Amino acid sequence: MLKKAALFALLFVVAAGIGLFVGWQPSSSRERLREGRAFGDPAGRDFLRTYDLIAHLWSVNVGSAMRLQNTKYGPEGRREYLNLILDAAQKGKATVTDPTTLTLIDVETGITYVRLAMVEEAAGNLPASQTWMQKAQATLKHAGWKDCSDAHLKKLVQALNKQDSCDSGCGKH
Amino acid sequence: MKALKFCSVAMSSGLLIGTMVGWHFGRTITDGRLIWEEMFAAAGYGQLALRQYEEADAVHARQALLSFTDFARSMSKLPSAEHDHALIIDTGRSYLLLAAIEQLAGNDSLSHRYVLSAQESFKSMGRDIPEGDLNNQVAKIVKAAAPVIPSS
């Protein structure tokens, strides 16, 4: 009797596992299709590419801001995460054509350069810090920023680190 | 024959229940992920546009805010953005910032149009804010921004 019950349970669990996968895939795909249904034309596809890129960039931005605020992470961990933003921005720029969106990606890139400069400065790598800061200043100036001084950018990024790391835990803004 | 019947009952009941659970959670978890993605995209674009307003010259600030309002308009067609009031508030706020930029630039009629767009935006979430109140908000923004935004 016990053997029979165990066999029943085993067969039931195996079939339920298969069923879980069989049910999951189509319902998940259906929801994704429903999400993008209104964007079938070329302009819509452009929008979806920008949308995916910004969502990805911002999720990595929030993650990196949290790491910059958390003393548990050393320079290596912080660098690694900040480089993820630069990678995502670089890859993303190849898929976006709208000049204003490209400028906004440059703003995110410029802010990431400032963060890298501050990480290197804290680690005592002053030449690397200066190089990142120069790249930040050139990028942000190109994006139309009025004040690209070291002091202003550092002060701004310190405030952004607090704000962006709080974004994930305390709400959107 | 009896054993086969026994096995098929176990398998078919497992398959049926598994499929139902999989369908439910596949939909729920994917919906959650899509809402999460929508929140990141809206917050990201909104914050970057706001950053441009605060840090860049009037030309770049204007472009960024207009781009955000276009982006938000497209986003509002997404099922995941259906209940995102933050997106509507950010859009309304961007129109008010645009109104302030245009007022500083001396384009009063365009500024007024942006105030009406802001009003329309807030109205879409059930908040009918009188035009006078929105004009007061624009005046406050103009007062705060006057020394930093040059007219163009």
Image (cartoon, grey):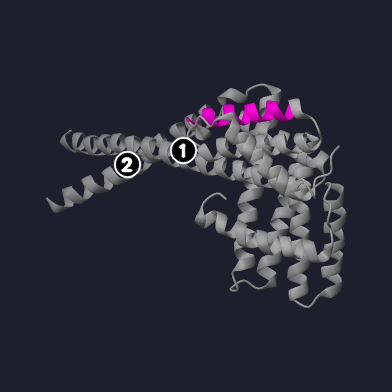
Identify which residue is drawn at 76% across, 29% down.
Answer: B108
The residue lying toward the viewer, choosing from A167 and A129, is A167
Q: Which mark is residue A16?
A: 2
Give the Cα distance between marks 1 and 2: 23 Å
> In terms of secondary structure, where does tag 1 sit?
helix
Q: Chain of mark 2?
A: A
Q: Chain of mark 1?
A: B
Q: Is A109 on the left or on the right of B85, as rendered?
A: right
Write down the quadrant of residue B14 in the picture.
top left
Write down the quadrant of residue A100 in the picture.
top right
- Mark 1 is on which residue type? Asp
- Camera sees residue B96: yes
The answer to whether residue A109 is above or below residue B109 is below
How packed mark 2 is, by other alpha carbons closer than 10 Å (few <14, some 14-19, many 20 or more), is: many
- Mark 2 is on which residue type? Ala
Q: Residue furthest left?
A: A1
The answer to whether residue B85 is above or below residue A6 is above
Residue B141 percent across, percent down from the top left: 68, 44
Residue A71 percent across, percent down from the top left: 60, 73
Q: Is residue B30 magenta?
A: no
Q: Which residues are magenta?
A: B110-126
Write down the quadrant of residue B93 in the picture.
top right
The answer to whether residue A59 is above or below residue B92 is below
The residue lying toward the viewer, choosing from B106 and B17, is B106
Q: Which residue is mark 1?
A: B31
